[in-house]
Image (cartoon, grey):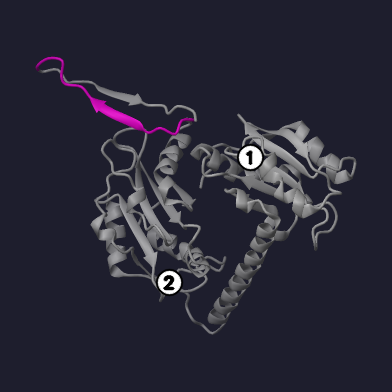
Amino acid sequence: MAAPSAKLTVAPEVTAAFNATTSGSSTSRSLHLKIDHETITLTKTTGSTSSDIASEFGSIHSQLDVPDQAAFVLFNMTGAENTAGDKWLLVTWVPDTSRVRDKMLYSSSKDHLKKQLGLTAFTSAGGGDYYGNEPGDLAYDVYTQSLVKVVELNEMETAQKENKDQQIASGVAVAGAALSGMGIVPFSFTDKAKEYLSKFQTGSIHFVSLSVTGDCIIDISPGFESVSGVNIVGMVGSQKLAPKLVQDEPSFCCVRCAGKSVTATSETFVYCCPELSQVRKKMTYSSAKGAATVEMKKLGIVFDRSIEITDTAEVDDYLKFGEEASEGAASSAAAAITHTKPQRKGRAGKTKIKKFVADDE
């Protein structure tokens, strides 16, 4: 999704410590970082590259400054199998107890951090990234197992691409698939799905949930018709969106959110992919995402932003925070609108707009 903050500044001490270990003048294994206002700062260095890498990796959690808050850890991979020289891994620690704003900020800043330090300094395994949100994730065997899963997914993607190339070579049309790789296999929409998307486009409904069936057909999600009357997200009296989403499988959603004024709205595309979803379904939805957005564009639906979530419980906070971030606000609270009665006969009442700001956690 769109970053809540633009490119952050990397503090000089971060670069200095990183370069010192890379050059060999320091033997620090881990560099602990945090985002302080608009700057990525160094909080401490720990471990030694001469110590056992598995033990050092397993100690990351115990060495975190504040374990229940988000953080970055630059971990030197010296001693790892199939790693040449001093290669680095960026560990993004974002526990469930983190604030929504921090989850978005750390997720959107990791690529910028790697670019500032030099992409070639990071291991190619897993793209040089590792994500953890519970202590069990910060175990070396769990990390290495995640690399095996990445290889399996890459092999599946390669097989799908080869299948697509064969289809193109034999003159078979791939619906909604661009040669850029979006829409690896053919997908099509049911008439029912197109009907509800058209209603969304005209503004008669403000929420559509879509699911992919086993035969590459995109249809409305099971049970959607009973919850399709969701109000504009962010408006007073609107329902919570989280309970309306498919909870245990991936889905695509179109959501209309309240903007700066009563008449202003924005459209958001939400790709919900719960972490416990089957790998095959994750791959299917990843391939179908391109076809879905192409078809929606044909129907006249233009999205102001796109977000991806793995926890349905947080969709309302993400949507509200995203709206305020786009307006330059730092708070994650939504605007509440109230009306006063006319002061006297023949004189119109005033509309007051009051913004409630959540306390910092």
Q: Measuring 29% from the left and 59% from the top, which residue is drawn there?
A: 224
Q: Which residues are magenta?
A: 330-345
Q: How many marks?
A: 2
Q: For residue 28, what is the image quadrant?
A: top right
Q: Measuring 66% from the left and 44% from the top, which residue is drawn there?
A: 61
- The mark nearer the N terminus, 2 or 1, is 1
Separation of marks 2 and 1 at Cα, in angstroms: 39 Å
Depth check, front residue: 109 or 188: 109
- Residue 64: x, y in percent? 67, 39
The label on residue 187 is: 2
Q: Measuring 63% from the left and 40% from the top, which residue is drawn there?
A: 71
Main SS type for the magenta part?
Answer: loop
In the rendered view, would you say 261 is above or below 49?
Answer: above
- Residue 45: x, y in percent? 77, 37
Q: Is residue 138 left or right of residue 240?
A: right
- Residue 41: x, y in percent? 70, 33
